[in-house]
Image (tube, grey):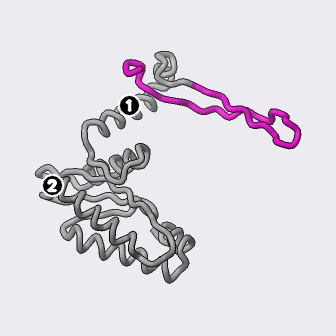
Amino acid sequence: RRQRQMCIRDSYGYEHGNRFLQAVAQGVLEMLPCAYAARESSHHFVFMIPGMEPEKVKEGLHGLQNKVNHIPRGDRISLKAGIAECEAPADPFETMDRARQACFYAERHKESFQVFDEQVSKELRFQEYLVSNFEEALDRGDIQPFYQPEIRVLTGECRANRGTIHAELAAEK
């Protein structure tokens, strides 16, 4: 947590970084008073809000984003948030993990906020499949390897190849 705070302070300076973090925390308390919140990185947050409709949470988060945009510090930051609905009885660890997965999904898909839903769950299951069955996924064509040459600009010489993969469920291609 301290490293994350230092990242904000490095970006905005100690005084402005503290002011930014305090304003975000105050905004969470004002906009989402019954929330359990965790900060994942400088601008990624996860929320578990018992008994609150996801649309109300999104309204609160839009208000929080507006408040953050008006913190005097020189530039804007786009908040990313994952939201998980609590089902009774709620397992707080599972619920926060779902919110965290929704936040990662929002980041990958260039969204501000994401509720943990069937689409997020499907993507998560696919990722677990890839990790657990790597060779099978490669054989089925779910994973496509690509090689990108690293060229030295001064000489035009190929120094190395960097391997990357593209993963897509073969049935969806």
Q: Report crowding for label 2: few under 14, some 14 to 19, many 20 or more residues within 10 A (C-alpha).
A: few
Q: Amino acid at mark 1?
A: Phe
Rendering coords of residue 127 (x, y %):
41, 34
* Nearer-N-terminus badge (1/2): 2
Magenta extent: 145-173
Rendering coords of residue 172 (x, y %):
38, 21
Q: Amino acid at mark 2?
A: Glu
Label total for image = 2
Left/right placement of residue 11 relative to residue 65 reads right
Task: Residue 166: say if magenta.
Answer: yes
Gap between marks 1 and 2, in whole Å?
A: 28 Å
Locate residue 129: give its quadrant.
top left
Residue at 45% over, 78% down: 72
Locate residue 170: give its quadrant.
top left
Residue 110: numbered disc: none
Q: Report crowding for label 1: few under 14, some 14 to 19, many 20 or more residues within 10 A (C-alpha).
A: some
Residue at 81% over, 33% down: 158
Of helix, strand and loop, which one carries label 1?
helix
Residue 53: numbered disc: 2
Q: Nearer the viewer, residue 70 or 103?
A: 70
Q: Nearer the viewer, residue 39 or 62?
A: 62
